[in-house]
Amino acid sequence: MIDQPWRGFASDNYAGAHPQVLEALAAVNVGHQSAYGDDVVTARAADMIKDLFGSQATFYPVFNGTGANVVALQSVTDRWQSVIASETAHIHADEGGAPEVMAGIKMWTVPTAHGKLGPDGVQSQCFDMEFVHRSQPGAVSITQSSEMGTVYTPDEVSAIAEVAHRNGLAMHMDGARLSNAAAALGVPVRVFTADAGVDLVSFGLTKNGAMTAEAVVVVDPSRVRGIDFLRKTSMQLSSKMRFMSAQYVALLTDDLWLTSAAHANAMAQRLERAVRELPGVTITQPVQANAVFAILPDEVTAALQERFHFYTWNQETGEVRWMCAWDTTPEDVDAFAAAIGEELSSRA
């Protein structure tokens, strides 16, 4: 046990599980249920997913977000195909090359402003189609919310999907922080997924109060092939799936997932407001979800990292990332903002 719990701003993955998630896990830990997803809890979660994404949506729980992305992208690409994504996309920059190593999928990456891919960026990679010497694009992947904490509007998603489909490509959304995007946009999930032309989503709740709750949600079944088999061969099929599904049920009930994400977003906005006028702080990205990006003097960053956990995002520029979570408190934010001010003042 940890005697003195500590608070940090490195990642929303650092936060624990929501108490209602733990209660849900205990509640399903009685009796027997069929394995590998043939249980009543997974059936309930699947119905809730249909309520969010549409009546055709199918639910495939997996162990982690990287697994969700690998399984999803394999199901919409052939071995000779590639995926178009932002150069900062999680599948390219932060998954240890898993799509390439595990799925054999090449990435065509595009420079982007604030982490958001646009239709022109997609089109820029749609050339030499049917040319045997170039890896053929088979899908587009966008991250919602993006790695830079920005959020795609429904119209932006729709414009990308239109270009993707016009070129015969599937449209994938990496939604590890889909909750934060949904809370920021304030519209039903299907408005910026199914209705906007998204074919499949990696929908994660681990960053938003779950313990291990990630899934592939297939929005358009006609686009995917063999996803049941791919989940198994990718080592992402859970035998006791009810424990994963119970977390979805808990968080989707009474919109707990949205209120938790809205709180994390609000804490990020509180942090940004508290530090944006401090001499020596430059906010580098729009604060639209639960992330704040900033540049500080190197010596201030080093001193702060001895007191709080957070990451230096860009080693060349000194840009840092501060993440807020479902359990971040106003007191946490205010204490961190005060520490930033102290370190800056001590070196003025």
Image: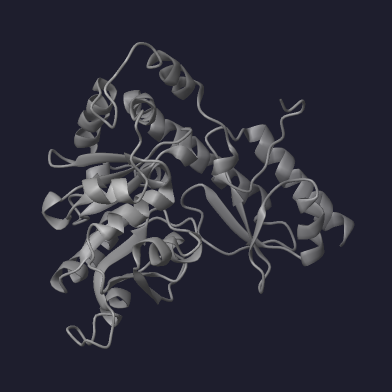
Say whether residue 114 is left or right of residue 32. Answer: right
Say whether residue 165 is left or right of residue 233. Answer: left
On screen, residue 265 above or below 66: above
On screen, residue 166 above or below 275: below
Q: Position of residue 293 (x, y in %)?
A: 59, 58
Along the viewing direction, whichever of 33 and 209 lies nearer the viewer: 33
Q: Is residue 176 visible?
A: no
Q: Position of residue 81 (x, y in %)?
A: 26, 72
| Residue at horizontal 34 percent and vertical 62 percent from the top | 103
Name the image quarter holding residue 161: bottom left
| Residue at horizontal 45 percent and vertical 36 percent from the top | 212
In the picture as drawn, the residue positioned furthest to the front comes out as: 233
| Residue at horizontal 48 percent and vertical 21 percent from the top | 22
Q: Position of residue 290 (x, y in %)?
A: 51, 47
| Residue at horizontal 33 percent and vertical 49 percent from the top | 202
Q: How is the image coloured?
A: one colour
Say whether residue 199 is left or right of residue 66. Answer: left
Name the image quarter holding residue 26: top left
Along the viewing direction, whichever of 321 and 188 lies nearer the viewer: 321
Q: Is residue 283 visible?
A: yes
Q: Position of residue 214 (x, y in %)?
A: 38, 41
